[in-house]
Amino acid sequence: MAAAHPQARVGDLDKLHALIDQVRNQQAAEEPTFLQNQAEAADGWKLVAMYHLLRAAEIVAEYTKEGSSGGRFDPVEQAEVHFDRARDAAEETSDTDLSFLISVLGCTTRSLVERSIWQIVHGAGTRAREFVKQLTSRDSEQPFLELLQPQHKALVEEGLVGTGRRSVVVSLPTSAGKTLVAEFRILHALDSYEAQCGWVVYTAPTRALVNQLSARLRRDFAPLGIRVERFSPALEIDSVEAEILDSTEDPVRVVVTTPEKLDRLFRGGWVSELGRPLCLVIVDEAHNIGASSRGIKLELLLATIKREAQDASFLLMTPFIPNAADIASWLHPTNNQVVKIGLEWLPNDRVIGLAKLKKTAKRGDSRVVAETLVTSAPSLHTEQPVELASGRPLGLSYSKIKNPTALATATAQALSERGSTVTLVG
């Protein structure tokens, strides 16, 4: 469920509303005749049960899109009323299949609501609610309706969306959505230091990651009026960056840079001269603290921040870190928290296969087939090769496509319609 494409989920909601409208139109036109001509009372009770199931679905769908249903924020309780009535109607029919269906849909409803991104906003602050409205909006390029399991654990179960912990270490697998966790921590920090115009720094170890993160934060935070700026990895503070730091009319609230550049900001006195509290420091790829030379520099930087920025909280994010509790305790001995998800969690099904080229009877034609090597679940493995393309892939004859580069290109093209893939060429 969590791995489904967001646009698909929006489409499912549209289909549900269309179905409900269709049923209501049929109810108005055909229900009187149906009830008059029915031979069994059980048919009427089945109809009643179905009406209540549709109403429960409508409540959950409205909550999923809007964060409320009928102005109320308790979709499970509202839906449960209709599930109870549907169960009562099903008992009158003695239809065990219908009763089982109602029970399954009741469990599904709870799961959908628990995974909804709207579960984050309760007590999380004004900015968090506005951010969720923006994420779920149809105007968004990819409406975001539900949380991945690691995001749900971190933000809802562990309460990171509104925690007051000064030191937090989050260890989540790759592709688990750590950036969204960081975004909600940023919003909470800015809300907490709104009167003082506090600011946040988000560090990443490489220029590419800095560029990627700054682009995303700008896109997500611009509608909220939060200014995000990227500082180059260069050790010196250039004139543009100095002007950004000195700006008072539109103060920067989030700076994205490398740990080395942040260290320069501290050593050059820029952080203290800014006159606004640094309220949150986020360290992405925090496992680098264990590296030989760069790790020592990162450790010294964190020690400097602890000493000189009394308002700063810490969020360290990494896919793996063996001593997370020790690091969280070092940053603050008592006011710390560790959130850890096992590496066995995967965001989606995974198949590793080997592409091969096969000759066909027709001269110059060929077949590109894939053999499965490793799968994330036994049920995904297939003994027979899977045909990806046939004839003349890429418009090339067998003799021209049999080199590794052409074969890899043909394989990637054939798989591109199925979603994201990674192609390795020997």
Image: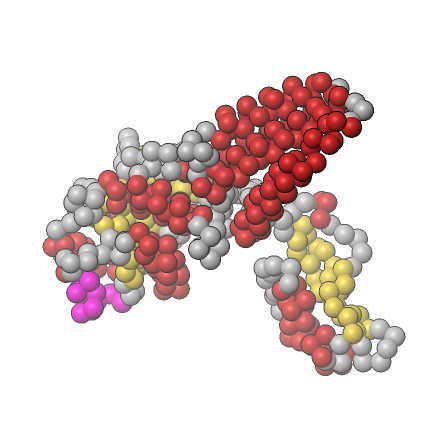
Residue placed most toward the observer, 335 or 361: 361
Quarter of the image for the C terminus: give it.
bottom right
Number of numbered discs on residues: 0
Position of residue 62 in the picture relative to residue 158 (left or right): right
- The answer to whether one can see residue 361 in this image is yes
Residue placed most toward the observer, 136 or 213: 136
Q: Residue at x 64, y 72 (%)?
A: 409
Quarter of the image for the N terminus: give it.
top right
- The answer to whether one can see residue 286 in this image is no
Residue 55 drawn at (x, y percent):
57, 32
Quarter location, residue 390: bottom right
Quarter location, residue 100: top right
Residue 149 drawn at (x, y percent):
51, 40
Q: Residue at x 75, y 21 (%)?
A: 41
Residue 93 drawn at (x, y percent):
74, 21
User: Any magenta on residue 236?
Assistant: yes
Q: Which residue is drawn at 57% across and 31% down?
A: 56
Residue 50 position (above or below residue 226)? above
Q: Give the range drawn in magenta.
A: 234-244
Position of residue 390 in the picture relative to residue 412 (left or right): right
Residue 219 drawn at (x, y percent):
37, 58
In the orientation shown, which residue stands out farthest toward the right? Answer: 361
Residue placed most toward the observer, 207 or 293: 207
